[in-house]
Structure formats: C-alpha cells, structure tokens
Amino acid sequence: MRDLVAALLQGDKRAAGKLISLIEDDEPEAVDALQRIYPHTGRAHVVGFTGPPGVGKSSLINRLVRTFRARGKTIGVVAVDPTSPYTGGAVLGDRIRMADTGIDPGVFIRSMATRGHAGGLALATFDAVRVLDAMGSQVVFVETVGAGQSEVEIATRAHTVVVVEMPLTGDVVQTMKAGILEIGDVYVVNKVDLGNADVLVANLKFQLAAREGWTPPIVRTAALEGQGIEELADVLERHAIFLERSGFRHGREVARARQEILETAQRLLVRGVSEGSPTGPLFDRLANAVADRETDPHAAARKLLESHPKKKRPR
Amino acid sequence: MVPIPRKIRVLIAKPGLDGHDRGAKVVARALRDAGMEVIYTGLRQMPEDIVEAAIQEDVDAIGLSSLSGAHMTLFPEVVRLLKKRGSGEIVVVGGGIIPADDIPKLKRAGIKAVFGPGTPLGEIVSFFKKAGKGA
C-alpha cells in the first residue's frame, strides 16, 4: 500500500479521504497514522459552527469558504450529520449547500456521521480536522449536527466557536438559558431578511459579556444573499489574532489536550474491560458470586478492574 | 466486543441539467435505512464535481441518476475521470430513464449496473452492499 501519510503531507486529497475513513472506522493503522500526522498539525485556525437545524450553518460556511478563498486561504470543512440510532445509516446532506466550491483545489469538504456519539460531533471529527490541518488547510470549519441546547462539545475543541441563531425562534428567555448560548466567541443572527432581527440581537446583547478580554460580537447575515459575510470573515480573523496575541490559543490547546487525553484513556479502559472480560473465567466466577449474593456488583466490578492485565496494551 | 463492520459510504449524485431528484432521494433513503452512510450532493453536478466529492468523501460507490437523456455522455465521463484520478476502484452505477439499448453500452463504459424505473429497492440495496464489501 502506498504511504498515505507521506502522500497527505504532499497535499494529496485522495490520501486525506482514505485516512479520514481509517480513523472513522477505527482501524488499527489509524493510531499509527495519527501519531505521524500530529507533529504536522497545530497550524490551522479551527472554527466551529453550532446552532439549531436549518438555521443556515452550511450556507454560511459555503459563503465563508468563498470569501476566505478570495483572501488567499486554503480551507477544510468537516460537516457532521446524525446517524440513525435504529439502522446505523445516515444521509449526509451538508455538501448540497457547499456545491459552489466543488472542484476548487484549495478546498476539502468531508461529511461525517455521528455514529452514535453525543454532543453534536462524531468521535473522529477532530482527528479528521488534524488530517486537514496536516494537509495544509489554513482554516478548518467544523459544522456540528443541528444542535439543540446542550451540544457544547465543540466549545472544548475549536479555537473559535460561532453560534448561529435566526430571528423568530423564541423570546428573551430562550437566550437566557444555559448551554449553547454561553459558548460562542462570535454570534451570528442569520436570515435577517426574515425581519425582526433587532429583537434577537437586543436579547443576545443583553446576555453577552466580555470574557477574557473578548466581547463576543454579533454579526447579522443573510447567507443565501451573501449579506454580512465579509464582516463575519473579518470578525473570525480578528478572533484568531486575539487568541494568538493574548496567549489564549495556547491555553485552549492545553484545555483541549487535557480533555482529549482523559477521554481517550477512558475509551481505552472501557474497551479493554469489555473486550477481555466477558469471556474470562474470573468474570464468570464474579457473575455467579453476585447472583449467589456472595458479593455485590460494585465490589465485583472493582475486582474485575484490579485483575485487568496491565501487560495487554489496548490499542 | 464484536468487531463493527466497516461502514459502507455511497455518493448519490445528479449529473447534468434535469431537476428531477425524487428517485435519487428514494434510493438515498433506502440505503440509509440499510445502515449505509449516504452523501447526497444535490442537483446539477458536473462529472468533475462528482468525482472530486467521491474522492474527498472516500466512498465505496457512486449512484448516478439522470432523467434528461444525457447519460451516455455524463455517466462514462464520471468513470473516466475516476480512473484518471487513480480512484478506479470506486463502483459506479446508474439509474433513471435509460433506454434498454443504452444499457450494454454503459456497461462496456464501466457502469457496473443500471437500475431503471420499477427496480425493487431491495435489489439496489443488495447491490450496494456487495459493492461496499468488495471495495
């Protein structure tokens, strides 16, 4: 097999596509590939988009891709849509609204299904972002699934979080609720052509306070008309500069690393326990002991963990 | 843990200028319900757009739908461009209004199957399942 990582670092899109699939499918070679990719990452500005379904996230990204391309930047996009909890299937439709940029060599778009992961993202989303980063994408947009009110995982992963809302979706109390409306570095009121945007802008202003020296700006857009896009692009660039100069970019990287190490360790532990255990003789003994009231499930679980062979390194 | 089978990814695309995508959407939904990940790219795509999307999305197969009569130009062009990009392993199938006389010619041009109106969805689903496994 051709060396995918070497090809990726040369900017090969086919290699990028294949590597992202290996990561998504959790293939053994993905771990090794990511290890080799990692030193080549950390250059891209990662911008996450979240907000309710149908609010215009894909259309905004489509416009922004064109704007940033005109400003000379190469762009990656990872767009996440939900997996069916019943069949495991998915229809990934974000690309429809990004069709304008189809064959631009400076653009790479990947659709991704959540595959059961909660939080508005897929497990593989940010490893896919790394693939695009290593390929040389200077700005990477991440589109979450149309999030409800608590899909805030993006906040711990992106450098800049854009929360997209639209007029006529609720009163002032909706903007006071905890969760998604606390995580934005930038707020977009899209579909301003629907009217009544002033009310939402005023409600948002009422909620937003300066955080770490950055007051989240509110940008009015109409993505399909291309209105407000230049201003939004300016704001995103300003935030990137702010993060760099203030040192917060590094801070966010460390916060992300902490979370990621912890999550990965938990996942490996869970996998290690569920792979080896249910067939082992100790597991059988413990299950019978619990059933016979010789011990209780909590004590049995602790015994199982203690016995977990350290030498068997989970991948 | 039972190893999870690799997900089959399929691109459903509408090359050319007709605006009828009900059939494409019905197929997309059937494949979704069979547990596949279906990328639907919408109307009026050039073969170049479709091939680029297929490579970036790393799909196992592409389903092309055309009701405009331009299939003899557009379908083989997709196959040709895929080979040119080194992605000839991606299976290409067609559907829509395809005259019976054209089907053998399309197959000679590398279109692996043609599903006309009235094809049972189960037949289409099992074809894509096989295509995904072989890739």
Image (tube, coloured by chain):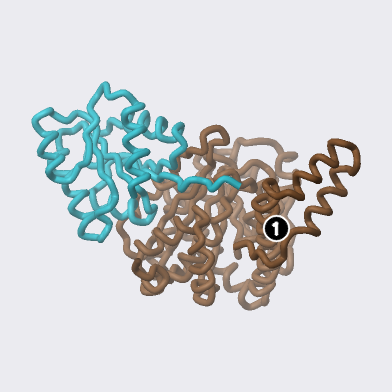
Chain colours: A brown, B cyan
Q: Can you say which quadrant of the picture contains the C terminus of chain A?
A: bottom right
Residue at position x 34%, y 38% in the image: B128
Q: Is residue A43 above or below residue A100?
A: below
Q: Residue furthest right?
A: A294
Residue at position x 55%, y 64% in the image: A46
Q: Pointer 1 indicates a residue of which chain?
A: A
> Which image quarter: residue B95?
top left
Q: Position of residue A7 (x, y in %)?
A: 36, 71
Residue at position x 70%, y 53% in the image: A273
Q: Position of residue A220 (x, y in %)?
A: 55, 51
> Which image quarter: residue A217?
bottom right
Closer-to-camera residue (B60/A260):
B60
Residue carrying label 1: A269
Closer-to-camera residue (A189/A24):
A24
Q: Amino acid at mark 1?
A: Leu
Residue at position x 56%, y 49% in the image: A144
